[in-house]
Structure formats: C-alpha cells, structure tokens
C-alpha cells in the first residue's frame, strides 16, 4: 500500500493552550485508522487540521500532506468534498431541519458532482440559488442510489422527508451518503455513532465499513470508544494530552499494550464481572419507585405496553432497549412529563399520576432528571451558582444566604472546587458540566434520579469518573437511580438490576449479571450480540 496522508510534527496552540504537541502519523490507501482518546486529548483539533479547518486564531506548525498537497495551504480548500470528506458527529446539528433530505442531497451533488455527472444539465434552482426538489433526472437518480447504498429503505420516498421524520440511525446514514457522494479518497469520521443505541450503531458501522472497503476509501475514524475502534480499524492511534502515546494493530493493542493509558482504556471497554458482583449491595425491602401496568399510546401506536418494574431504595435499575423501544416515554411518565393512558407510578410510596400544584412541586424536589447533554441542559449565560440555586427558588423557602450554603454543599458533594462558583458552563469540561447538573439535583434534596443517557456525551475516562461519583453518592446519601442507557458496558458495570424494553414491552428483567450471563429474551440476546468490542474480547480471551 502507498501512503495517502502524512502528518509530520503537527503542533497546534490556541493562545497559551497546547492542543497538539508534535503529532506524527500516516494513513495508507484503503486503510481504516482509528484515533482514540478522552475529551481534551486533541482529537477534534486533529480532525480540523486534517480537513484544513484549523481556526485562523490558532498557531500551527508542522505539516499535513494529503495526496501531495499541503492541507494548510489555500489550495487545500479544493480538496474538501472531492479528495477528503467528513462524517460529522451530530446529524441533528448537521442536517438542515427546514429542508428535505432530497434538497440537501441535490445541493451537495450540484456543488460536488462526481465525474459521471459533470456533463449533466444544472439542477433547477429557486431564486435563492438553492437546488429545488425537482432536479435534473440524473441528480435524482444519483441521490436515490446514494441513499440505497447506505441501506436506507424506500430511498425515493425519503427524498421528500425532513430530518425530524427520520430516526437517529437513518439521519446518520444520510450523513454517510453525503460524505461518499463525491467518492473521496480520504474520509474523516468524527464520533459518527456515539449517540446511537448498540443495534443501530452496529448496522451503521457495518454499512460504513462496507462502503469504505468497496470504494477503497482511506478512513480516519475518530472516537472515544476503544471498543468501537477495535471492531472496525486496521490500526489504532491512542492520543492523550495532544500527544500520541501508542499506535499499533488491534491485535498488538489488545494483547500487548505498552502504555498505561491504553491499558486503562481497554480495561474500561471490558468491564470485569467480578468487579460488577462486588458492587452489589444488600437491598432494602422498601421501594423507591414502583410502576404498575403503565400504558401509553400516540394515535393508533402503543409505545409503552403494560410496563411493570420496582426499584428498591439505594439501588440502580437500568432500562435498556433499541431506539423506539419506549425507554424515554416510560421515563417521561415516571417524571410526570407525560400522562399515561392507564397504570400507576409511585415514587417513595406516593402515587404521582394526576398530581398537580404544590403536590407536584414537592414530588419534583425528591425526583429529579439528569439530562443526556449538559451543553443543552445548562443555561450558558448563568453562573454555576445560579444554575444550582435555580430549583431551590421553586422548591424551597430558603433565604438567599441559606441557598448559597446549599449550593456550596452540593459542589462539595460532586467534588467541584468552590472557585467554580462564578464560572459559566462554557468554561468547564464536559465532565465538570455533568457534575454541575448532578449538583443541581442534590441541592434541592433529590432522592430518586432519572439518568437519561447521562453519560453518552462523555468519553470513557470521564464516564468512569462520573460513575465513581454516582456510586459514592449512592453509598453516602442512599440515592436511587433509574439509569437509561444504550451502553451495555456501562450498564453492566453500574447497575444492580436491568430491564429490557422491546416494542414498548418489558421482555426481561433481573439482576444485571444474571441477565447478561444467561439472557432469556431474543431482544436481550440481540442487544448483547450488538455490543461493540467483539473483536477485542476475542483477542483478549485468546491471549
């Protein structure tokens, strides 16, 4: 194989902050290279450098040569879309919500048409110059072909749909289709499946890998999940604090990792059953959460069908399932944000369905939600102190000085320094922001927390630190967690019991180690079979 991309002594500084410190790597033609590391390791800076998108305020030295062209030069702009393309992380932010899938594909094809379309007539355009949804026939055919190539069913019909009408997996497939539309030589994929459940992630990655192999496309796959990286990569680069600490084949890393940091990442990708068993505690007999025969329909579609579950105080119950299985709707009914068609919910012995006014406010002081993404759940204009104190103004009659004391106590509980009292979310790391979100629930006196994918936006190292915090808070304060997650490795490490939802029904429930070791439901087996890291587990078991 010949080299298509060479990075030599790449250094990037953002003011006094060093983002990359002399990175050297190469990419061979047709190779899939994974770059892994925690938040702040330099992955995003490296991604932008490979695409020639380093901000003008950054200080850059070294070299990035793509197909004999220096990417930092002005001429590199012509490479984007044709020689190198990007699959971004968040389809919700990358697809225009007010334009159809077809319009977005047609525009991309018009701007970056592949060779066979260069002689075709221009697509019809609106007065604004944006491609209309009635393009020249060859563009439409090409768009349908692209959607079909990434495994999207009914591709012609999908052209007329808007992003909100597609599932997360389908939207990510659209982004893959857009990236491959110009048949690039190199494709950079930036955390393209981090928000997807395991079964959808497996399908999307399988499609992505098959397309790359069939086109002979070289891939730089950027991820914080080393299990995902080892499933699809030929070679893995481990990045920490802007430096490469180790590189090698998947087999080399799985069986003979040299760097302590690499071994830590591998350990977090393969949770120990012994450790999980050691975490088990003696359960109290009284229940913090009881759900009986919960039913919810939207129109003629039943999304939650006779769900029953009980969570003893001081324990963690994980709710898992594919996208659309009913996890979020169940959680919303438990929180009182949706009214069930029938059934009951008891929190700390109190029936919650139909509560209003003061009774509902009192409930919400005991039952709190930790959102998936602290970037959107924390007001960027407010200080940490104001964010944590805000629910106290609604759920307590504390004087201002007492509220400030409660805020400081909450910060201490989540191990954040008092110096962050006046900081804003944008000045904090992802892990610190999620700790602020947890502190906000503690300040108001929550006893039951609903953690809705609360770790999915964090890298594995930060995840582990937050999990350790949650374990500590549960032991010290007796907290009860309803943990909704698509990450089965985290579920195995963190939860006492697990329930598997499929088609709105709870098809299996029991102690986590028992369910994972001997699943009885097809839906459970399918989720476990789709877990990333199969290749890694096989290599470790054989070594």
Image (cartoon, helix red, strand yellow):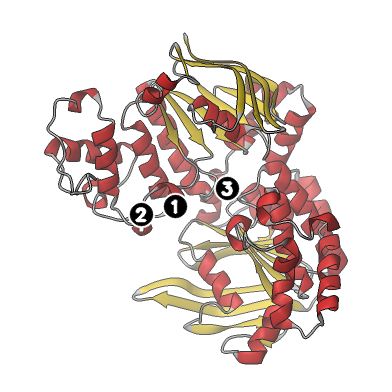
Judging by the rendered image, the residue that carries numbered circle 2 is 163
Percent of width and height locating residue 318: 65, 61
Q: Residue at x 58, y 33 (%)?
A: 57
Mark sitting earlier along the chain (3/1): 1
Q: Is residue 158 above or below residue 304?
A: above
Q: Is residue 31 above or below residue 400?
A: above
The span from disc 1 to disc 2 (Cα, nearest Å) is 8 Å
Viewer-proximal residue among 541 and 206: 206
Q: Residue at x 29, y 45 (%)?
A: 104
The span from disc 3 to disc 2 (Cα, nearest Å) is 29 Å
Q: Residue at x 48, y 28 (%)?
A: 51
Q: Residue at x 77, y 58 (%)?
A: 470
Quadrant in the picture for the C terminus: top right
Q: Which circle, 3 or 2, is nearer the viewer?
A: 2
Judging by the rendered image, the residue that carries numbered circle 1 is 92
Mark sitting earlier along the chain (1/2): 1
Percent of width and height locating residue 372: 60, 58
Q: Name the side, left or right, on which 20 lies relative to 412.
A: left
Q: Secondary structure at mark 2?
A: helix
Percent of width and height locating residue 77: 40, 25
Viewer-proximal residue among 451 and 288: 451
Q: Is residue 465 above or below residue 231?
A: below
Q: Are marks 1 and 2 in contact (CB under 8 Å)?
A: yes
Q: Is residue 99 visible to us here? A: yes
Judging by the rendered image, the residue that carries numbered circle 3 is 528
């Amino acid at each position: 194989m010949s080299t298509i991309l060479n990075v030599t002594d790449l250094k990037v500084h953002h003011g006094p902050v060093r983002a990359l410190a002399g990175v050297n790597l190469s990419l061979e033609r047709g190779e899939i290279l994974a770059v892994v590391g925690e938040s702040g390791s330099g992955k995003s800076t490296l991604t932008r450098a490979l695409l020639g998108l380093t901000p003008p305020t950054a200080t850059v030295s070294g070299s990035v040569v793509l197909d004999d062209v220096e990417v930092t030069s002005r001429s590199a702009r012509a490479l984007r879309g044709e020689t190198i393309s990007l699959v971004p992380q968040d389809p919700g932010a990358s697809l225009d919500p007010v334009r159809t899938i077809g319009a977005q594909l047609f525009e991309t094809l018009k701007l970056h048409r592949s060779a066979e379309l260069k002689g075709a007539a221009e697509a019809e355009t609106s007065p604004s110059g944006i491609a209309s949804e009635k393009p020249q026939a060859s563009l439409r055919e090409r768009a349908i072909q692209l959607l079909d190539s990434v495994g999207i069913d009914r591709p012609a019909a999908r052209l007329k749909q808007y992003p909100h009408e597609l599932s997360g997996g389908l939207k990510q497939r659209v982004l893959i289709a857009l990236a491959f539309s110009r048949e690039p030589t190199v494709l950079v994929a930036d955390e393209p499946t981090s928000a997807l459940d395991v079964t959808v992630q497996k399908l999307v990655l399988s499609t992505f890998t098959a397309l790359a192999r069939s086109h002979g496309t070289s891939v730089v796959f950027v991820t914080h999940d080393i299990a995902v990286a080892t499933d699809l990569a030929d070679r893995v680069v481990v990045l920490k604090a802007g430096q490469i600490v180790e590189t090698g084949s998947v087999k080399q890393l799985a069986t003979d990792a040299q760097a302590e940091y690499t071994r830590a990442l591998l350990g977090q990708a393969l949770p120990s059953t012994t450790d999980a068993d050691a975490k088990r505690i003696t359960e109290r007999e009284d229940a913090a959460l009881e759900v009986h025969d919960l039913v919810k329909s939207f129109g003629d579609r039943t999304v939650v069908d006779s769900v029953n579950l009980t969570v003893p105080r001081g324990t963690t119950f994980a709710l898992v399932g594919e996208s659309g299985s009913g996890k979020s709707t169940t959680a919303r009914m438990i929180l009182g944000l949706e009214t069930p068609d029938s059934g009951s919910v008891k929190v700390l012995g109190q029936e919650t369905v139909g509560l209003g006014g003061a009774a509902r406010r009192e409930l919400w002081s005991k039952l709190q939600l930790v959102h998936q993404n602290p970037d959107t759940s924390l007001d960027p204009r407010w200080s940490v102190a104001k964010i944590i104190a805000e629910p106290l103004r609604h759920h307590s009659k504390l004087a201002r000085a007492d509220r400030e004391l409660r805020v400081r106590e909450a910060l201490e509980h989540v191990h954040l320094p008092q110096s962050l009292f006046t900081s804003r979310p944008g000045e904090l790391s992802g892990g610190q922001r999620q700790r602020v979100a947890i502190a906000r629930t503690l300040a108001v006196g929550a006893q039951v927390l609903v953690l809705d994918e609360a770790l999915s936006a964090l890298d594995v190292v930060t995840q582990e630190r937050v999990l350790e915090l949650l374990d500590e808070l549960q032991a010290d304060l007796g907290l009860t967690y309803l943990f909704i997650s698509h990450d089965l490795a985290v579920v195995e490490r963190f939860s006492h019991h697990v329930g598997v939802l499929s088609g709105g029904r709870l098809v299996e429930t029991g102690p986590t180690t028992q369910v994972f070791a001997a699943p009885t439901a097809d839906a459970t087996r399918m989720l476990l079979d789709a877990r990333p890291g199969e290749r890694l587990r096989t290599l470790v078991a054989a070594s």
